[in-house]
Amino acid sequence: MGVPAEIACADVVWDINGKEIAVSRYWLRHVHNTSVSFSWGDALQTIADKFVSSLGDTSKGGAIMTYISNQVTLTRVDAYQIGTDGHATDKRTSTPGTTIGGSATGGYIPLLSAVVQLWGYDPAQFVTHPRRHRGRIYSPCTPSSLFNATGELPSGTADDIAARYGTFLNDIQGMHVGDTTPPGGGTDSMDVGVLSRTDTAFYQMQAVTCAYKPGVQHRRMNKLANTRSAATDIAHS
């Protein structure tokens, strides 16, 4: 199972209270105009810088910080060019010049997250093999207080999370990469979407939703000591 041509990804790397990390991966596809001079290295730096600047702007990607714990900060964004064999062929990194982090207060469980669902088709329409057209992002460290008695996110909260991630991805979608051209000329850009290795296809993103049920990422507690309680004896009578 390969990867189509002209694919990149951006790994958003978060620090969780100095003990763990969380990585959110976003897939992108290069849209080329023949009149534009294009370099993957320069484009990757533009991608990484754009993610950082968007997340630092509360009117754009920074809108998602409302639902991320204030114990979580952005460490860096790594942008990769991905070859058709699925392996990275180039990389650029951007780090924030000032602290960018969540603003939600209250307790959280590191491995428990709101699940942001990414749709490569209209959710209201039918598509064959729908799972191949969908992706997901685990929003890091969703505050425990947001979940109701059944362990779910209330519909209004889920709607707001989806809207804020939509604001973020709408800012990323269509970012210009490559050299500028004279007025009236073309520009290169990056589409945001869902990668299907099964189909060897990239599906441009159509919508964002948020699941009511939380997701679990066990790897976000890898550095916490695997301790246990004191033993309670069972009497043999």
Image (spheres, rainbow, N blue to C red):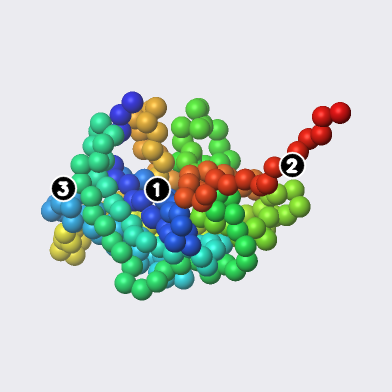
> Mark on residue 232?
2
Q: Residue at x 30, y 53 (%)?
A: 78
Horizontal side of residue 7 vs 164, given as left or right: left
- At label 1, the amino acid type is Arg
To which residue does mark 3 refer?
Answer: 34
Q: CA distance from mark 2 to mark 1?
A: 44 Å
Q: Residue 153 or 143: which is nearer the viewer? A: 143
The residue closer to the viewer here, 163 or 113, is 113
Image mark for residue 25: 1
Where is residue 87? Give x, y as percent.
26, 36
From this view, report whether residue 169 is shown above or below residue 84: below
Q: Residue at x 28, y 34 (%)?
A: 86
Q: Nearer the viewer, mark 1 or mark 3?
A: 1
- Looking at the rendered structure, the kind of residue marked 3 is Thr
Crowding at mark 3 (Cα within 10 Å: few <14, some 14-19, many 20+): few
Q: Is residue 162 visible?
A: no
Q: Are marks 3 and 2 in contact (CB under 8 Å)?
A: no
Q: Position of residue 98 (x, y in %)?
A: 36, 73
